[in-house]
Amino acid sequence: MIEGIPYFYRRLGYDYALADDGAPSLPAASLPAGDGGGLTVRPATVADADALAAIDRRLTGEPVLSCPRDAATWRYEIAGRRPADISRNEVAVLTDGDAVRGYLVHSVRLFGAGELVLFAAACDRPDDWARAAPAVLAYLGGAGRRYAASSGEEFTLVRQRLSPAHPLVRMGPPGVPKRQRAWYLRATGPASLLGHLLPVLRDRWNTAGLRWPEKSMTISTYGRSARLDFSDGEPAAVVAGHRSVSPATDPDIHAAIPPGALLQLALGYRTLPEVLHAWPDCVTRDRLTEHFLTVAFPPVEARLWPRA
C-alpha cells in the first residue's frame, strides 16, 4: 500500500484500490465554538496510549476497514517522532471527566493555502458523536488559528481526510465537496488475497443464507486463478487454481476478473455491478455466480490514516 505520483506506480503492479478521504473541506469560518456539551479535547500524552489502543481494538469490530494501533505505536505517534519528521502529526484526545472517549489526529502545521489536515477521528461509543462533533470542530478551529498566528499564514479551512460516511462528517457543517482519492495497492495473487478474506466471505454468505451448490468456485485474473473449495455449501479453503488459455470462455472458470478489479472488490472500494460496468473484460459465468460475488464484496467504508 502506497501513496505517490499519479499513474506512476501502476507501472510497478499497483492499482488504485482503497478509498482515501472524499469528505468535504470545512471553511474556517464554518467551524463552531463551544465546549461540545460536556466532552473536552486536549493534546494527548504518552499516558493516554493504553486507552487509545483499547479504543482502536473495540472499534475494529465495526463494519469498516481499519488498522488499529497498539499502545507502543500510539506512544510513537504522540512523542516518538523527530520534530523534522514530515510524517509527524498532532494527536488529541476526547475526554469525559478523566475518561478518554476518543481521539483525533491532525497536521502539525498548515498546508497549501492555509489548510489544516484532519487524518483521523474516533469515538469509543458511537452515541458520543453528537456531543463530540462540536468539541472536535471547535478544537480544530483553535489549532488552525494557533498555527496561523505562529507562521504568519492565513488559516482558511480544515481538509478532512475522512470517508464521506464518517460520523463527524455527517454531524458537521456541509463544507465544500471534494473528489475522492485512492491509495495504490498491490496483492501477491488472487489465491493469497481471497485466502485472507475467507472468514469474511463465509460470514457474508452465511448472513445472506447462501450455499454454493458446487464443490468449488474458480476465479481467474487472466494469468492466475484462485479456487474456492466448499464443504456443505460453505467455503472451506482457497488454493491456487489452474491457468486457462481463455478464462472468459472457459466453462471451468466461474468468473474472470482483471487483477485490479478484484483488488477493488476485495477491499470494498467498488461493488461487482460497478466493476462489471467499468471493466468489459470482467465476466461472470452465470447469474448465480454474479449474485454470490455481489454478496461477497459489498462496499466497505475505509477509515485508515498512514503510518510511515
Image (tube, rainbow, N blue to C red):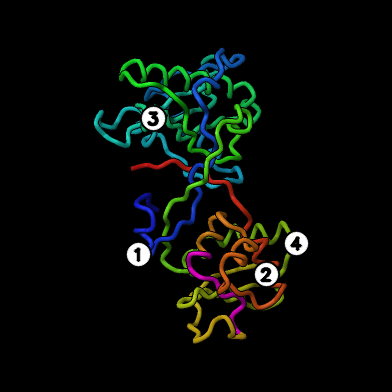
Query: To which quarter of the image does residue 11 belong?
Result: bottom left
Q: Camera-side residue: 166 or 33?
A: 33
Which of marks 4 and 1 precedes in the sequence? 1
Query: What kind of element bears circle 4?
Result: loop
Q: CA distance from mark 2 to mark 4?
A: 16 Å
Tell me whether the residue at label 2 lies in contact with that at label 4, contact meaning CB atoms closer than 8 angstroms.
no
Q: CA distance from mark 3 to mark 2?
A: 46 Å
Of the two numbered discs 1 and 4 in the rendering, the one whose residue sits closer to the viewer: 1
Q: Amino acid at mark 4?
A: Gly
Which of marks 1 and 3 precedes in the sequence? 1
Q: Amino acid at mark 3?
A: Ala
Q: Report the span colored magenta.
A: 252-261
Q: Horizontal and vertical percent for residue 141? A: 47, 20
Q: Give the residue displayed 61% in from the left and 30% down from the top.
A: 174
Q: Give the residue displayed 60% in from the left and 14% down from the top.
A: 38
Residue at image mark 2:
290
Tell me whether the residue at label 3 lies in contact with that at label 2, contact meaning CB atoms closer than 8 angstroms.
no
Query: To which quarter of the image does residue 64 belong?
Result: top right
